[in-house]
Amino acid sequence: MVTLAELKKRLDTLSPTGIRFVARMVESLSAPPQARVNKQKTWLPGDWIEYFGLALSVHHGTTTQPLEQKGFETVFRNACESVGWAVGKPVSETQRFLDLNLKRGGLSELKLSLKSTAAQRLSRTSVHISKLTEAAWIQDMRTAKQRRKRTLALFREYMNAVGSIMMLRAFRKGQDAPSEYQLIEIPSSIFQSLQNASLASFNADGPTIDCSYGKHDVAARVSLDRSDAKITVKQIKLAACTVHVEWEIVPR
């Protein structure tokens, strides 16, 4: 770790343009977003949350665009490394479902999929995943029996590979910079009830199947999108998820 004295020494080597750039970053860091933490349920430590908030500050010190998928993945990994968690090598893009294996010392290992959204008019009570995964086979399935068999096999594989989906949601008006970010966790077990879905549930060419979870009769709705050959998950109840933290972005 670079000490304060070493940092000051390095600043002396920068050009005037470099100093202006650093000054802008420092100004961004001096006004970090306000964090509302779900202390009863989050497993994220305070230092992790602070690091992520500072990264949001730096991001919005240079752009009004939301922090989206690739940037989110990088910041998430860096925040984990900043608190001493082992994240391993980046998962190959060819590996299905899983984005991050997270080892937290003596705590249980976490298998995470990372998603983000900055869609307009995000709901405050439900969550939408436009593409959980690709599924090219959807377009070739002609019978309910075929669709059911392939869907249940896919979700068994998914739940075996992924423990939770971590999703960053950016709330904004129009093309303005986000006013708020929300980090939520969706348990993959929310899809478990699919294994009990009736054959009739798969009659349509592009069926939508309801998933029950906990006290929620319909906690999520899984849709087989034939037009784009993908799995979409609609109307995930936020009450069935964990909201870890929300960051309010300070206007500049």
Image (cartoon, helix red, strand yellow):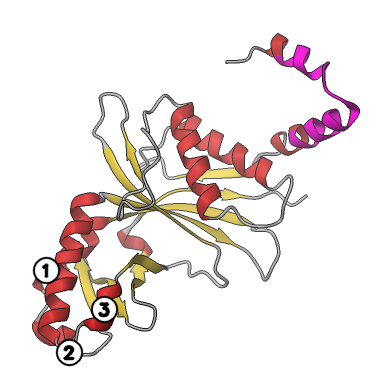
* Residue under label 2: 203
Magenta segment boundaries in residue numbering: 7-25
Residue at (51% x, 54% y) in the render: 69
Residue at (14% x, 77% y) in the render: 148
Q: Magenta stretch containing residue 242, yes or no?
A: no
Q: Is residue 246 visible?
A: no
* Residue under label 3: 138
Q: Nearer the viewer, residue 136 or 50?
A: 136
Q: Alpha-carbon distance for marks 3 and 1?
A: 18 Å
Judged by its main secondary structure, the magenta piece is: helix
Amino acid type, mark 3: Ile
* Residue under label 1: 195
Q: Quadrant of the N terminus?
A: top right
Check disc 2 and report its element: helix, strand or loop.
Answer: loop
Q: Alpha-carbon distance for marks 1 and 2?
A: 16 Å
Asked if residue 143 is positioned above or below residue 45 in the image, the reply reads: below
How busy is the neighbourhood of tag 1: few (under 14 within 10 Å), some, or many (20 plus)? some
Q: Position of residue 40 (x, y in %)?
A: 36, 42
Q: Position of residue 187 (x, y in %)?
A: 28, 54
Check disc 1 and report its element: helix, strand or loop.
Answer: helix
Residue at (62% x, 56% y) in the render: 66
Residue at (23% x, 58% y) in the render: 158
User: Of label 3 and label 1, which has the lower sequence position?
Assistant: 3
How busy is the neighbourhood of tag 2: few (under 14 within 10 Å), some, or many (20 plus)? some
Q: Position of residue 218 (x, y in %)?
A: 25, 73
